[in-house]
Amino acid sequence: MSILILIFISTVAGLLGSILGIGGGMIVVPALTIFFNVDIRYAIAASLISIIATSSGAAASFLKDHLTNLRLAVLLEIGTVVGAIAGFLISGQINSSALFILFGGFLLFTSFSMFRKKNDFISNNDHPWSQKLKLAGEYTNEKGQLIAYKIENVPLGLSIMLLAGMLSALLGIGSGVFKVMAMDGAMKIPMKVSSATSNFMIGVTASASAGAFFLRGDIRPAIACPVSLGIIMGAWLGARLMPKMPTQLIRKIFIVVLLIVAVQMLAKGFKL
Amino acid sequence: MNDTHSLELKISKFLRFGVLLAGFLMLIGIIIRFKWHGDPFFNFQFYDQIPFQKILEHHLKFGHWGQLISYLGLIVLISLPVLRVLLTAILFIAQKDYLLAFIAIIVLVSLALSFTLGIEHS
């Protein structure tokens, strides 16, 4: 019975994730720890698996739409993978309460960043690294126009990716929010390209630490499999239903839910 | 440029297929194990580190097929991004973009390194 409930919750997570463009980790980890009383370490390890599932499925469609900047993704992946390794190494030393607090803090940060308005830039300045590696690209916007863009601040973007990778390994999330922040905030890349490229990269980041957690024995099929199945189904459903969904309304409800969950995670961390 | 696009599409299809395969394996694993008793999450309330190798030996010894197939599904899923990076490296080589192919290989090596860290720490 609990297995079915877990699959259901994960399906909702996958659904929301694909509609709102967020990883399911933010829903899965709190659900596992708060409802099912699973130790946060197992929850994080299981969540990473589901992140890989979401990312690989999403990656497939973004490649088709030619929004993903494959070259940039590969470069930035150095940052996220190194960060993930560091995160995994730290995870062995850090205790559960600290993880809960970190997670709660991250949820707060995410809910605030969902509030802010997004301005879309097109940059004409190509950073020297971008020129050398020919990272700049073009994409087709909603109106069907081909827009060329350049990329700034590559080293800064890489550094933020290090942080994103670390958080991914520590909290079992995709860190999409940081990746998008690095790309559209620091590197001035158009929003659509940032999202697509971020989704593409998330799987690699998760895989870096998932492999290590797996061999350490932290990924337990009893938890990870129902979660992954639910997320896969939910993401598939989300992609189909997306055109018909009142995205803004869902977004607002989600921000409220995030805040509530953030408080609960923090409370668990501070043992209130 | 059309070559790139069709190669990217192939990578797309491969990823999609991989996810479905993994999902299928996991589903079979759950179904075989379906006679779980009581609260299946009871054992996970407290973290107890058991290296994967020991777990694997245990399941092989007792012929726990459900668990073994589930683990196979998990392995497929974890290897997907790794394979994806490899395919991307090949794509760059096909485009004669050796610098970027080299970077992709660095990512690949880092991934392999990160996996081994899991063993050392058990």
Image (cartoon, coloured by chain):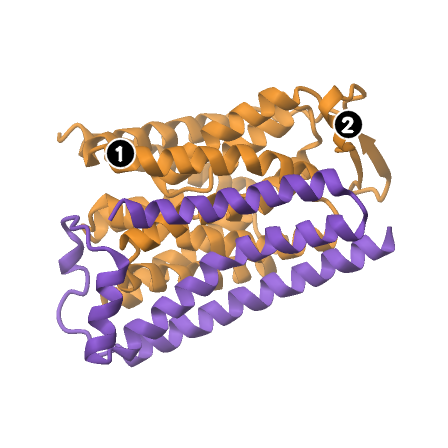
Q: Colour of chain B?
A: purple
**Label 2 marks which chain's residue?**
A
Residue B10 occupies which quadrant of the picture? bottom right
Q: Position of residue A70 (x, y in %)?
A: 69, 43
Amino acid carrying mark 2 in the image: Lys
Q: Which residue lies at the image location 18% right of the left edge and 55% below the top edge?
A: B44
Neighbours of disc 1 within 10 Å: few (<14), some (14-19), many (20+): many
Looking at the rendered structure, whether the residues under marks 1 and 2 are on a common chain is answered as: yes
Q: Position of residue A61 (x, y in %)?
A: 66, 56
Dot 1 corresponds to which residue? A99
Q: Position of residue A143 (x, y in %)?
A: 83, 42
Dot 2 corresponds to which residue? A132
Q: Which residue lies at the image location 43% right of the left edge and 37% below the top edge?
A: A84
Q: Nearer the viewer, residue B39 or A246?
A: B39
The quadrant of the rendering that contains the C terminus of chain A is top left
Q: Which of the chains is orange? A: A
